[in-house]
Amino acid sequence: MALLRVIPRKATPSVFMQQVARLHNIERDKIGNREVVGWGINGMYSYVDHIAFPMPAIRFKENSPEIMALKEREKGDWKKLSVEDKKALYRASFCQTYSEMRAPDGRWKSITGWVLFGISCSFWIYIWEKLFVYPPMPDTITNIEKRQAQLKRMIDIRVDPIDGLSSKWDYENNRWKK
Amino acid sequence: MMRLFSQRMQTAVRGSLTAVNRNMQPAAATGAARFMSHEVQETDEEFDARYVAYFSRPDIDGWEVRKGMNNLIGMDLVPDPKIIIAALRACRRLNDYSLTTRFLEAVKMRAETNKDIYPYVLQEIKPVLEELGISTPEELGYDKPELALKSVFDVHG
């Protein structure tokens, strides 16, 4: 139902206004009997609860006879409205109060659970890799005599003589420094 | 003084807001003209005066009140009690009660940075609340959540 033409004829103001009118009619069908009260976020007839954007474009509830009767009383003295009336008026215009918008919803529990599950899956995958994918370690790592020979060579060529390995070796007495 | 905790940003939305030109947003006062950036620097008093004048306009309509409130709450500041009072009186002229409660909740949200701000604001606007018969959100029980929203996963069965 492409009501907005892809290739418009000459875009005169009246063509534009027709398209605006069509868009507003589509919007109005979506919202039913609700009163449009403001610009909203982007000019569309939307309702959004957001703490930094208190007044949406439409009232939340459709206009029913009870609400219309309440609105008549709203025109008079507000001191005569009871607490229930005031709450009913609020709920007619808005869906959630600020406390409800910001109330904790416990999503962190499922998020934490799934994250930990994902991490443990990766651990299992690593175990499978170690068992079935990686070849055995070379003997330069598994054979202790070869590793000691490598360490001796590192000390002989003075690796890290200032703060590292060779600085901990006592060359005078051929042993580790105490 | 309520803007000690803020960075000020000019209301950026000017120009036509709908097909009918609703360019009634308070235009920035021309303060000192020697700054390089486009932003017009205005003092706190000028800002307050601008918004008080905006809300105090006798023929203001619901559209403009809501736009003003949305812009004001979108800014990183707590509105001065003068502005809040002007906005509440505008709601009274419009015969719209729910706007007052929503606006007070929004102000309370903005005042969270320092726990002394909201009690101060309430104290300053108390005469107007009593005069117009407006209950604070606490008196209506809206400082705690009252209703819960159905989870989106349960909506379509």
Image: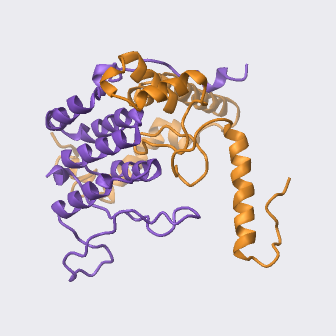
For image coordinates 40% across by 49% down, the residue present is B65
Quadrant placement of the C terminus of chain A: top left
> A26 left or right of B152?
right
Depth check, front residue: B12 or B69: B69
**Would you identify the image quadrant in which residue A35 lies?**
top right
Across and down, in percent, residue A99 comes to: 38, 27
A9 up-or-down from A126: above or below: below
> Which residue, as the protein is rendered here, is positioned at the far right?
A1
For image coordinates 27% across by 82% down, the residue present is B36
Depth check, front residue: A175 or B53: B53
Numbered disc total: 0
A46 up-or-down from A12: above or below: above
Across and down, in percent, residue B25 comes to: 39, 62
> A32 left or right of B91?
right
Residue B48 visible in the current orientation: yes
Residue B122 visible in the current orientation: no
Across and down, in percent, residue B135 comes to: 29, 26
Depth check, front residue: A133 or A46: A46
Depth check, front residue: A98 or A10: A10
For image coordinates 46% across by 36% down, the residue present is A144
**Would you identify the image quadrant in which residue B104 lies?**
top left
Q: Which chain is orange?
A: A
B65 up-or-down from A20: above or below: above
Colour of chain B, in one word, is purple
Task: Give the colouring mode of the picture.
Answer: by chain
For image coordinates 71% across by 69% down, the residue present is A16
> B155 left or right of B9?
right
Across and down, in percent, residue B80 comes to: 20, 48
